[in-house]
Image (cartoon, rainbow, N blue to C red):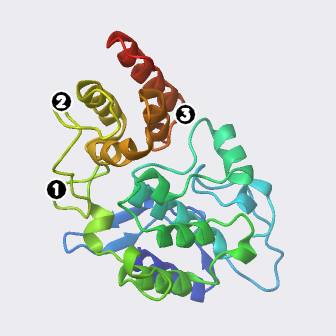
Amino acid sequence: MDQLLDALGCAHDRGVWHRDIKPGNLLITRDNRVKLTDFGIARIADRHLTQVASQIGTPGYMAPEQYLGGPIDHRADLFACGVLLYRLTTGRTPFSGAPEAVMYQTLHQEPAAPSALRPGELPTALDAVVRRAMARDPRHRFADAAAMRAALADLAIGGPSTGAADSFDDRTLVQPRHGSAAGPIATPTGGSGAGSSTGRGLDAALVSQVERALATHIGPLARHLVSRDLAHSANVEELSRSLARHIADAPEREQFIATAAALAAAAGKSP
């Protein structure tokens, strides 16, 4: 992101808006340098011309003003950088579906915060950076690429805006989506498998099954979340609904809740 923002700052200083920032237009060289490519639809600023945008770009990365056909400037590229940052840190795009659905979401909906999609792995301070970069109103975005780069630098070193609890190093951003032993999230040693105590009287074998069901949606982080949410869950229904909030996709959430209820019924327990 630092290198991309530096490249955009160079282009913007010369009055060039790229208008199609996306993974496909970024190349990584053998020495790990980022090359920004494909200026085929770039617009060159000219104070003597009225700049009216057309719907040119890639759905999902286009800024709202690109969809609306209004005036655009360098901040359309910063919006796309926010989308890219969202994808890099969460493993998913903030907007999805058919082009029409993506356009509607871009214009009217707020995507889930990155830290909500990877709880405990991403600092909440990252949410503010992404939210500002992806603000629907260009006036609410970063003033320029350098300002966004500075915000990321503060975040990366745990600067004043992040707080000590939210500081993180480069490994946080590049670890696999579901976490790893080398990442900042450690799997609890107690676990919630068969034979362990839940602390709330729930059957340990049943809780272990619920944990495995959750893991099919979010991976190894399931054990950590189950161990944590057991403390305030009196039964399997409460536990499954508490855990379901960590699943980003709504149909998958409902599927998980139904699976947990079926497991409880099969075990002869009231869900």
**Label 3 – label 1 distance at C-alpha:** 28 Å
Q: The N terminus is located in which quarter?
A: bottom left
Residue 146 % position (x, y): 52, 87
- Amino acid type of the residue that numbered disc 1 sits on in the rendered structure: Ala
Residue displayed at 43% across by 87% down:
159
Q: Quadrant of residue 27?
A: bottom left
Query: Of label 1 and label 2, which has the lower sequence position?
Result: 1
Query: Of label 3 and label 2, which has the lower sequence position?
Result: 2
Residue 151 higher or lower than 188, as above or below: below
Q: Which mark is residue 75?
A: none
Closer to viewer: mark 3 or mark 2 = 2
Residue 104 % position (x, y): 72, 45
Residue 57 higher or lower than 126, as above or below: above
- Mark 3 — residue? 250
Judged from the image, the secondary structure of the residue bearing numbered disc 2 is loop
**Label 3 – label 2 distance at C-alpha:** 29 Å
> On the picture, is 185 further left or further right than 158?
left
Query: Of label 3 and label 1, which has the lower sequence position?
Result: 1
Mark 3 Cα-neighbour bin, 10 Å: few <14, some 14–19, many ≥20:
few
Closer to viewer: mark 1 or mark 2 = 2
Judged from the image, the secondary structure of the residue bearing numbered disc 1 is loop
Mark 1 Cα-neighbour bin, 10 Å: few <14, some 14–19, many ≥20:
few
Q: Quadrant of residue 191?
A: top left
Q: Which mark is residue 181?
A: 1
- Amino acid type of the residue that numbered disc 3 sits on in the rendered structure: Ala
The number of numbered badges drawn on the structure is: 3
Mark 2 Cα-neighbour bin, 10 Å: few <14, some 14–19, many ≥20:
some
- Mark 2 — residue? 194
Answer yes or no: do the residues labelled 1 and 2 have beta carbons within 8 Å? no
